[in-house]
Amino acid sequence: MRPTGFAVPILAALLFGACASCDEAPKTQQVSEEASVVQGTPAVDTAKPTVQVEPPVAPAFELNVPRQCDFFQQNAVRKVDILWVVDNSGSMKTSQANLASEFPRFIQSLLALQPPVDFHIGVTSTDVDNEKLNYDIDRDGPILPKDTRGTRGELHGFDLTDKGGETGRYLACNEKGECNVPKTGGNIDAAAAFAQMSKVGTAGSAIERGLQAAYLALTREDNQRAESPISTDLSKKLPFIRPDAALFVIFVSDEDDSSCAPFVPLNANGRPVSGEPCTADPGCRCDSAHLTWGSAQYFTRFLESYKGFGHKDLVAAGAVVCTEKQPISAQSGDPAFPHLGCPDQGPDKPAAYYGDRFIQVAAATGGTAISIRGSFANALQSLGFAVSGLRKDFRLSRGPFTDTLEVYVSEVNATQCTSDAECDGNRNQKCRSGACATLKVVEARSLTGCTPTDSADKPGLEYCKCESASFRNILRFNEDGQPPAQSSIEVCYDVNSNFNQVCQ
């Protein structure tokens, strides 16, 4: 069929519209660039191609060693309360004689400190069984009836009325050098009071519960409140235990602690026999596997929390016990039971049993143990206590690579900072935690023992993993180098993943 006449114009119009919608083809233009002729002789580099080596972005492969920083706060005051817990069982006669002879030197070392230290000293016994002890005057020496105490945490006091003084439950001296005892020839007669206090006798229970005795002494109401706040007698005006004073607890015993239940005999391998009654002493021990109460960890937590949350550094325990583990024979009970301790070396050094639980609590609270056969004159220093009330030992939370230790001390009024440039470089100061702190040099590092207290060449700052076979893991500031009151101490180190708590 032929198209109609009007179809041609319509087709033409459609084609025209389609062409009108098409864009024009793009046009290119040549960019005009300036060119210049370089003078010289053309040359071509004939060297071999090389690869430029850039320094690595990451260091060479090595083990990732954690970095630990421990923070400590120095005590704020020169106040210290000292509780001695002395074994008063029948086997302590020789040890108590040694203790009594050394105590005057110990107390004089406290009184000689300048400026004077504000201190309280109390003594109780390991006997928590008897309400009152039955002393034997021929065996225990003359003791006034009013002084036959020291049980269940009660303090064993003194009576100096025959010297123009008074009676007292504990010895107290303040920051002015004033004490609650009279003077003889111008000198404070504290040694006489201390000699009476320390004489707890040897008629006490044969089951030494020193840890429980300390617990009882520290929780007794009469040891935590003032007897007479208006009295001029310091021991009546103030409580024995003061909330703002450092607390040192020192255990003295020739046997291990028995503040536990059940209390069972040992088997042929030296292990407690669970479920069997105890019929031998000292062939009985705490059943560590099945204790219902009285673990060493319990007493550690009690002491650490005694001053309240965040103040565990105000409390430490020490032990004057047998620190040896040599085979010894039983003094009583079944002779077949094996024992470890200090062998009998004659009348002046009788056999003693290893003080395991005392040593555990001492180590866990930042203190240590010294041998009961040694001198008591420097007991506080040997036990790691600062008699001034300021700490000199700081226990690390983890095991260090000792060559990576960095110690910073920032005083309470230290300059605030944001960079090292704002601190005194001449004093070896660095900006730490927003305050200028002095970098202290760790002069000695030992895995076997700290420098002896009587050494003439003690380092100013040293690291000790062990001391007297006790695990310590501490930094010790010796001589007069203790950080000042309220200063901050920061200790940073690389963590040793193979670190252990074994001490020889």
Image (cartoon, helix red, strand yellow):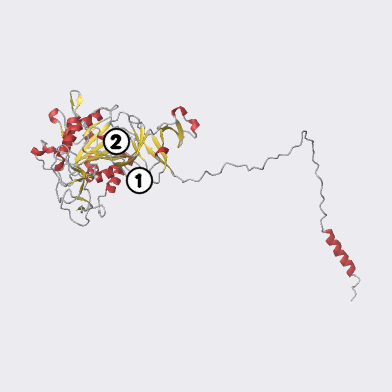
Residue 500, disc: 1
Q: Could you tell me if the residues under marks 2 and 1 are in contact, i.e. CB atoms within 8 Å?
A: no
Task: Specify whether 130 is left or right of 471.
Answer: left
Task: Specify whether 189 is left or right of 75.
Answer: left
Residue at the outermost top position: 185
> Where residue 305 sits in the image (x, y, percent)?
31, 44
The one of 39 and 167 positioned closer to us in this rendering? 39
Residue at the outermost bottom position: 1
> Where residue 6 sits in the image (x, y, percent)?
90, 70
Residue 337, disc: none
Quadrant occupied by the N terminus: bottom right
Q: CA distance from mark 2 to mark 1?
A: 24 Å
> Where residue 234 sits in the image (x, y, percent)?
23, 32
The one of 380 and 146 positioned closer to us in this rendering? 380
Residue 424 in view of the camera: no
Decide which of tag 2 and tag 1 comes sooner along the chain: 2
Mark 2 is surrounded, within 10 Å at the Cα level, by few (under 14), some (14 to 19) or many (20 or more) other residues, namely many
Please tell me in which quadrant of the rendered image residue 349 appears: top left
Q: Can you say whether 189 is above or below 152 in the image?
A: above
Q: Mark 2 — residue?
A: 385
- Which residue is depicted at the point 11% across and 41% down? 135
Q: Can you say whether 18 is above or below 256 in the image?
A: below
**Residue kind at label 1, given as amino acid type:** Asn
* Mark 1 element type: loop
> Where residue 410 sits in the image (x, y, percent)?
41, 33
* Mark 2 element type: loop
